[in-house]
Image (cartoon, coloured by chain):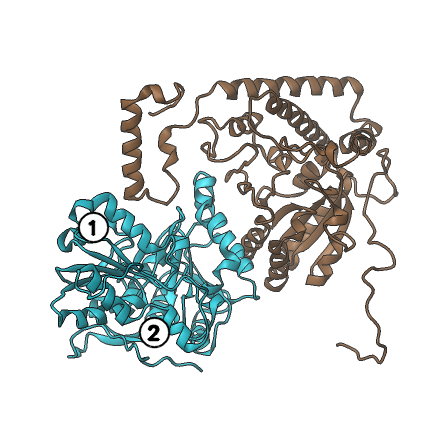
Chain colours: A cyan, B brown
Amino acid sequence: MLIFKNLEQGIRVIASRAYSYTTKEMTVLEALNSALHEEMSADPKVFLMGEEVGEYRGAYKVRLLKKYGPERVLDTPITEKGVIGWRRSCPRLNEVEEILNKYMLQAIDHIINSAAKSNYMSAGQISKYFANTIIFRGPNGAAAGVGAQHSHWYAAWCGSCPGLKVLAPYSSEDARGLLKAAIRDPDPVVFLENELLYGESFTVSAEALDSSFCLPIGQAKIKREGKDVTITAFSKMVGYALQAAEILVKEGINAEVINLRSIRPLDRSNINASVRRTSRLVTIEEGFPQHGVGAEICASILEESFEHLDAPVERIAVADVPMPYAANLERMAVPQIDDIVRDVRRACYRSSLLAAAA
Amino acid sequence: MVKFTSDLKFMSEFQEERIHCYRVLDDCGQPVSDEFVQIDEETAMKMYKYMVTLQTMDTIFYEAQRQGRISFYVTAIGEEAINIASAAALHMDDLVFPQYREAGVLLWRGFTLQEFANQCFGNKYDNGKGRQMPIHYGSNKHNYFTVASTVATQVPHAVGAAYSLKMDRRDACTITYFGDGGSSTGDFHAALNFAAVMEAPVIFFCRNNGWAISTPVMDQFRSDGIVVRGQAYGVRSIRVDGNDALAVYNAVRVARKMAISECRPILIEAITYRAGHHSTSDDSSKYRPVEEIEWWRVARDPVTRFRKWIEREGWWSAPAESEIRNDIRKQVLHVIQNAEKVEKPNVGEIFTDVYDVPPSNLIDQEKSLRETIERHPQDYPPDFPTS
């Protein structure tokens, strides 16, 4: 029904265009489903449940359903609270819970109070019995024209909660590696996908295509090395940051772009190491600015690398308003590539106007 | 097949008669009907002793809180029949998902008085490692899921667990307890609907005790209690006299069989009365008449009612009664004294079980905390175990 081709913000990983027969072009959605397929075939205790989310994803679910049967691929009534609560005590390892993460708020009590905290509160008894492995995955954040209640990013809220791990893949390789890692991880994981990235195609290396491939949780990746300023981003914003970096390099600003991959645990050591090299930091996120991921990164830098900073930390986030629907308003509310470019210039003291307010 | 009608008629909000309440013994402990499934003396005696133990334990722990020895306590006064009789009708393999007024179920399963006391004092022998407030018991060994303060969150959990028992083809079900207040939550709705659709072998046990803290049932719902909701979800249900131990026992026993053999959920609404306060943080005389409380506590006491029956059967007597009460009382006082003296959990337990493996930031924090304690011992309590 809805096939997302490259949008005007055509995002592509800057990679070699020479296709080796061992690499492959894969959309993020294909990558996620390949990861699910592999993990479900490797371990009979992995199972998937959730609500139907739309034809294009439904089509994938149908294939999984045909292959693994209704006992392992469950469609559920429409109540996120029920889905999460229900699963919370299924003594099965490695359960993958697919909900529209944008509706996560309906189930947030169970995600936080039942999943994140229960191992601690029960002194390890619940997870010995029920295996704490559960992944809450699904699309997050703004799609295009879906309004305020469908556009919320939960990275900051979930990221503040001890007991949870929070991942935000960007590329297909991220999607594969992080989903596989999440399925194999004994702790509850919130897996924040992005609807607009599902249709994006990326080159996936041979190594990443292997079924044993797994990315470490808690490690960020330097997507682009640079020496003038560090830009941290996650999910769709990584692509924007990379494009902004290409524009900036023509002005003589060489930006280092870090793909966070993991919101909790946050890879503080890599981010700090990068800022110690560049002395400047710009954080980008698609979530609200107050108490956001950027705020946490900024605090970490101040605590550990204060003397290395040559400029105040810049934070780029969505506008501090519920997401509007009209296309022009939405565009203004979400960070765009020129916002990033402008902000990086300011961090490098290159802007012509030093704005009084952000 | 839905039939058509030309009658523009709305279904009444009330049925003509309220759903009947199943009971075996009347208020004086006399069987109401000649046909009744006899339970053996051994089971009946065990049930009675545990009801007395629960009542005694609750009274003394409550007093201990009033004396400032523990911070908080919740009693099950008035609901001893529900606790013990339902537990007696289950098997050890059945998983229990409690709210917080079902310590008797755990007691029946073998959790010792000392273990209860250890949890309430949060000492180093607490198998909850001092992580939670008193009465938030949990034990893998006894298939008793750890109590959480959140109301009714255990209800959908029980459904998931039941589904998994079904997948594993186990001869076991799950049971989950909640109150009249808990039945108002979204979790209750989601759980019942899921259980019916997924055909999960779960017993939903509602302790309708008339009060949700200070909210009487009149302000909680306008339906004929909770039992009528079962049919709305396609769940078989029954209303029982919650103060009649034999009625509760029979209902749960049959419910269990149906749940497992037919792979279906069952809803049991047990009518009872919360004869104690909601918790030690509550004084219910502020919102309900003291005469009402006293009447239920004395005239409708489930322990007394069951005792009358076992006396009539010739299995019990007054001397046996005072002996057992003295004996249990001594035991409870003893375990409290013991638990009070034991030191608290090691400071390292602040950081474990957050994740499967402690992450680097918590390892750093623990190291930093230990160094600080070593450097400034005067700032920390003397009974602060660090090793």
Q: Quadrant of the N terminus of chain B?
A: bottom right
Identify which amino acid the numbered label 2 is placed on. Glu
Q: Residue A204 versus residue A127: which sits nearer the camera?
A: A204
Q: Position of residue A104 (x, y in %)?
A: 48, 60
Q: Position of residue A90 (x, y in %)?
A: 50, 54
Residue A263, above or below B90: below
Q: Chain of mark 2?
A: A
Q: Is residue A102 visible?
A: yes
Q: Earlier in the sequence, mark 1 or mark 2?
A: 2
Residue A172, above or below A186: below
Identify which amino acid the numbered label 1 is placed on. Asn
- Badge 1 and badge 2 in a common chain: yes
Q: Quadrant of the C terminus of chain B?
A: top left
Crowding near the residue tagged with mark 2, few <14, some 14–19, many ≥20 C-alpha atoms within 10 Å: many
- Per the image, the residue denoted by label 2 is A30
Q: Is residue A188 left or right of residue A257?
A: right
Q: Report, in whole angstroms, how far the alpha carbon at label 1 lies from the one at label 2.
A: 34 Å
Q: Secondary structure at mark 2?
A: helix
- Per the image, the residue denoted by label 1 is A272
Q: Quadrant of residue A143?
A: bottom left
Crowding near the residue tagged with mark 1, few <14, some 14–19, many ≥20 C-alpha atoms within 10 Å: many
Residue A208, above or below B205: below
